[in-house]
Amino acid sequence: MSARAEQKLRTRRALMDAALAQLSANRGFGSLSLREVAREAGIAPTSFYRHFTELDELGLALVDEGGVALRQLMRQARKRIARNGSAISTSVDTFMEYLGNNSNLFRLMLRESTGVSKSFRTAIKAEIDHFVTELAADLGRFAEEEGKPLFDARLVAEAMVTLVFNQGADALDATSKERDELKAKLKTELRMILMGSQTLYRHARGK
């Protein structure tokens, strides 16, 4: 890669980091301005357009990054699960680890999933769908390996992801003690969903 191309990538990264740095519990992406993001990144506002056509394009790049980061982390979690066998506990711990390291990325995805921008909503839905699809495949495989089939792995995955994202919103600004309590509660709720699907499967087959 040429020095010029590397510099362009660094500046693009600086712009994305600058936008993330300005997000908080009290400030969403929609309140950001191109000028302040450029200033935070240390470039002239006109230079912004060499990297993104508009601020929303930068936001969509962040959504993509957030989704990819979460999926990669959960893939790593599968290796941990293979070692200790605790799928729910390991997955929840991994998700909370993601929150701790990517709190503003998660804030962005959480807020914009119900925001006014259709492009944001569509992009975030696609990221969540990718995650649900991978989780459903994992759940189906784990259920087969343990001899505890599920009534519908896809529905279980959707319910789990919805619950985790909602609890994640509460965990963002929680204290360490509150986050530990949320983790324990979430693990119990996820096990209830899983056991409910296993029970439905047995009842559907008259067992």
Image (spheres, grey):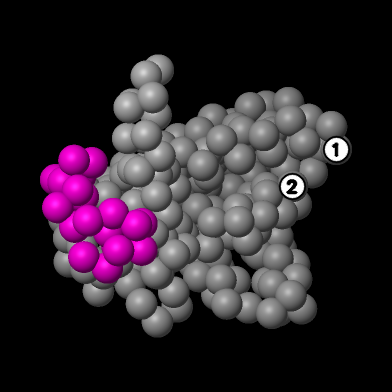
Kindly identify the amino acid type of the residue bearing the numbered disc 2. Thr
Residue 135 in picture, x, y percent from top left = 54, 38
The magenta span reads 35-55
Residue positioned 51% across, 42% down in the render: 69
x, y percent for residue 65: 42, 43
Q: Is residue 126 toward the left or the right of residue 185 in the image? A: left
Q: Amino acid at mark 1?
A: Asn
Magenta residues, dominant SS class: helix
State the count of labels.
Answer: 2
Q: Calculate the distance from the C-alpha at mark 2 to the C-alpha at mark 1.
A: 9 Å
* Apparent side of residue 146 relative to residue 120 in the rendered image (left or right): right
Mark 1 residue element = helix
Foreground residue, 93 or 162?
Answer: 93
Q: Residues within 10 Å of mark 2 (few under 14, many from 20)?
A: some
Looking at the image, can residue 109 be seen?
no
- Residue, far top: 1
| Residue 137 sits above or below residue 160 on the image | above
Front residue (pair 58, 143): 58
Q: Is residue 25 above or below residue 193?
A: below
Identify the mark at residue 90; answer none if there is no mark. 2
Which residue is labeled 1 in the image? 84
- Which badge, 2 or 1, is on the more N-terminal residue? 1
**Quadrant in which the N terminus appears:** top left
Disc number placed over residue 131 in the picture, else none: none
Q: Residue at x 27, y 50 (%)?
A: 58
Find numbered disc 2 in the image and state the secondary structure of the residue it sits on.
helix
Q: Position of residue 124 (x, y in %)?
A: 32, 50
Q: Does residue 117 show up magenta in the picture?
A: no
